[in-house]
Image (cartoon, rainbow, N blue to C red):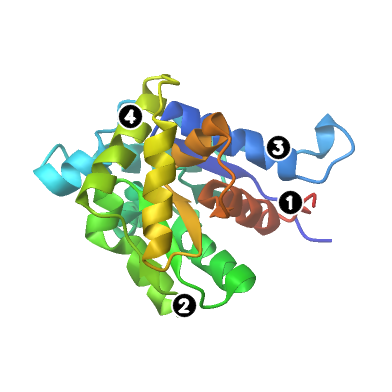
């Protein structure tokens, strides 16, 4: 029998996205009682500097704060670390030295799931301007043979407005603008979409969007559950 492991969530980027990941791990783990669940440590460090600002505008480097969180999670007893922030994975190679426990990459798990479910079908990428402009998702997807359709500049601005609305707890989201964006990206070849910012699955839920989405938070939860020796409830 495989030894059960504990998860460390390097959170706070943002807090609601962290709660969403925790909830998905709990709901997706096959259990019969409380005692069957995974031991999960969470460092919800909301003071980590903004990742997109650091990437695009020379803002405060978030790596020291993320590294400190990684160290704390190791000290707590985490056997594997996960980050519910797609953009933060731009810094992943710099964060790894702070942790003895390995990281599971949300980018890699999402690309693997896309390839598994849709083969080499073109996918539309939704995310922060930092995630898109750095090309971290596009490179991962193309490494798996998946063409990536990216939003234009106007659509990037809309996505950032949606993301920051969720971070602020606001439900004032422009559904017609979102639907128009998705339709335009489909006209350029996107056959389904990656919700490539951990606030965007929350946007999709709040707006009850019916498009074909891949939720990276779900894929990260799935990978962490299996890594720790537990079954995923299908």
The answer to whether one can see residue 60 in this image is: yes
Q: Which residue is mark 4?
A: 164
Q: Nearer the viewer, mark 4 or mark 3?
A: 4
Q: Residues within 10 Å of mark 4 (few under 14, many from 20)?
A: some
Query: Relative to the observer, which residue lies in front, 60 or 87?
Result: 87
Q: Which residue is mark 3?
A: 26
| Helix, strand or loop status at disc 1 | loop
Q: Nearer the viewer, mark 2 or mark 1?
A: 2
Q: Residues within 10 Å of mark 2 (few under 14, many from 20)?
A: some
Q: Earlier in the sequence, mark 4 or mark 1?
A: 1
Q: Which residue is mark 1?
A: 4
Above or below — where is 56 with respect to 124? above
> Are the residues flagged by discs 4 and 3 in contact, CB closer than 8 Å?
no
**Residue 97: which disc?**
none
Q: Which residue is mark 2?
A: 144
- In whole angstroms, how far apart are the C-alphas of marks 2 and 1? 30 Å
Q: Residues within 10 Å of mark 1 (few under 14, many from 20)?
A: some
- In whole angstroms, how far apart are the C-alphas of marks 3 and 1? 15 Å
| Helix, strand or loop status at disc 2 | loop
Q: Residue furthest right?
A: 32
């Amino acid at each position: 029998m495989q030894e059960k492991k504990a998860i460390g969530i390097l959170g706070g980027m943002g807090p609601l996205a962290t709660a969403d990941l925790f909830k998905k791990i709990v709901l997706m783990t096959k259990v019969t009682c409380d005692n069957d669940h995974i031991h999960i440590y969470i460092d919800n460090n909301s003071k980590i500097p903004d990742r997109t600002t650091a990437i695009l505008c020379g803002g405060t480097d978030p790596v020291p704060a993320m590294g400190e969180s990684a160290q704390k999670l190791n000290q707590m007893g985490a056997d594997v670390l996960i980050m519910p922030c797609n953009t933060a994975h731009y810094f992943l190679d710099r964060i790894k030295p702070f942790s003895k426990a390995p990281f599971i990459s949300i980018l890699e798990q999402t690309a693997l799931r896309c390839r598994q479910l849709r083969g080499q079908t073109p996918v539309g990428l939704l995310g922060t301007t930092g995630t898109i402009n750095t090309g971290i998702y596009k490179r991962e997807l193309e490494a798996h043979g998946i063409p990536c359709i990216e939003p234009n500049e106007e659509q990037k601005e809309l996505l950032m407005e949606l993301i920051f609305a969720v971070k602020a707890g606001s439900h004032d989201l422009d559904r017609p603008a979102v639907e128009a964006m998705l339709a335009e990206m489909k006209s350029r070849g996107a056959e389904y979409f990656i919700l490539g910012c951990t606030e965007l699955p929350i946007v999709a839920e709040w707006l009850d969007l019916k498009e074909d989405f891949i939720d990276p938070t779900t894929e990260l939860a799935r990978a962490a559950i299996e890594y720790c020796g537990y079954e995923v409830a299908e």
